[in-house]
Image: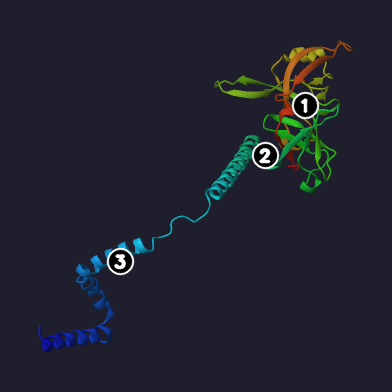
Amino acid sequence: MSYLKFQHVFGILLIFSALSGFVIPRRYTERAQPQLQSLFSPVSEPVRHAAAWAYDRVGPTARGDGRRVQDVAEENAALRERVAYLQRQLGIKEQRDAEQRELGPVGDISTAFPVSAQDAGTRESLILRGSTMDGLRDNMIVVCPQGVVGTIQRAGVAGAQVRLVTDIGFRVAASFARFRNDEKGQIELVSLPLPAALLEGVGQSMLVRNLPKDIVEKAGLAPGDRVVVNDEKWPEALQGMHLGTVKQVGPRRDAPLLAEIRVEPTMNPLRLRSVRVVMKDR
């Protein structure tokens, strides 16, 4: 190509560039841009690969963060501990939610508290990791999914004590019930025709000793029957909640006309890891 012909081509390109930049609308020039750029691929592709090869040889890209292996191992160990802790907390939260659902209406008016220890004294009681700062007050009722645990006693700013239903002298009004199959073959809980009973803790178990022996025999009370709350002083949501199971029925030694009914709790309260405290009356 002669010098004159090159000047002509260069001039045409300048004119086209001016038209593209100032005259032709941008929406038309943008459509042609990819096609024009592809014309330079035979030159740009080899140059790009050659530049990348040279850069990797002269100035290689830094890999990793430059920390010591020991530092990375310590951080990984800390992260594992954090994950294990969060998994444990999630498990506790899921367990408490399951207990609340299982308790039904009682779950809506109660709050979960962990058990920190059992009483080291002669009384049957638990120590809660909670205090009056958390809203705990004396005589609040403590429950778990298996039934009634006891009541709050000596709540203070440093902790709270739960007096168990099996503790000597604990008293609550109760009634008796039994599971049976109805006409459709479904299991139902029915009340036994017995007057109100006074359930007393005697240490590791409970006794009912205020019912006439003949009435108890007529009602057919037997081991395996359930003892449930029937105390007007307790919240309505707790009426009918499980207190224990009849273990033995017989006459009182000191009063043969009265029955002595031994009741066992459905769970070992001293092994509970958490309980729920009823915070509302309704």
82 up-or-down from 195: above or below:
below
Residue on which disc 1 sits: 174
Q: Are marks 2 and 3 in contact (CB under 8 Å)?
A: no
244 up-or-down from 252: above or below:
below
Q: Earlier in the sequence, mark 2 or mark 3?
A: 3
Three-letter amino acid code at the position of disc 3: Ala
Q: Nearer the viewer, residue 237 or 170?
A: 170
Residue on which disc 2 sits: 107
Quarter where residue 229 is shown: top right
Q: Position of residue 25 (x, y in %)?
A: 26, 82
Residue 103 makes an appearance in the image: yes
Three-letter amino acid code at the position of disc 1: Ala
The residue located at (78%, 17%) in the rendering is 262
Quarter where residue 176 is shown: top right
Compute the Cα span from label 3 to label 1.
90 Å
Q: Is residue 50 left or right of residue 68?
A: left
Compute the Cα span from label 2 to label 3.
70 Å
Q: Is residue 241 left or right of residue 85?
A: right
Q: Position of residue 153 (x, y in %)?
A: 84, 37
276 up-or-down from 53: above or below:
above
- Between tags 2 and 3, which lies in front? 3
Q: Secondary structure at mark 1?
A: strand
The residue located at (28%, 66%) in the rendering is 48
Q: Are marks 3 and 1 in contact (CB under 8 Å)?
A: no
Quarter where residue 218 is shown: top right
Q: Is residue 225 left or right of residue 4?
A: right
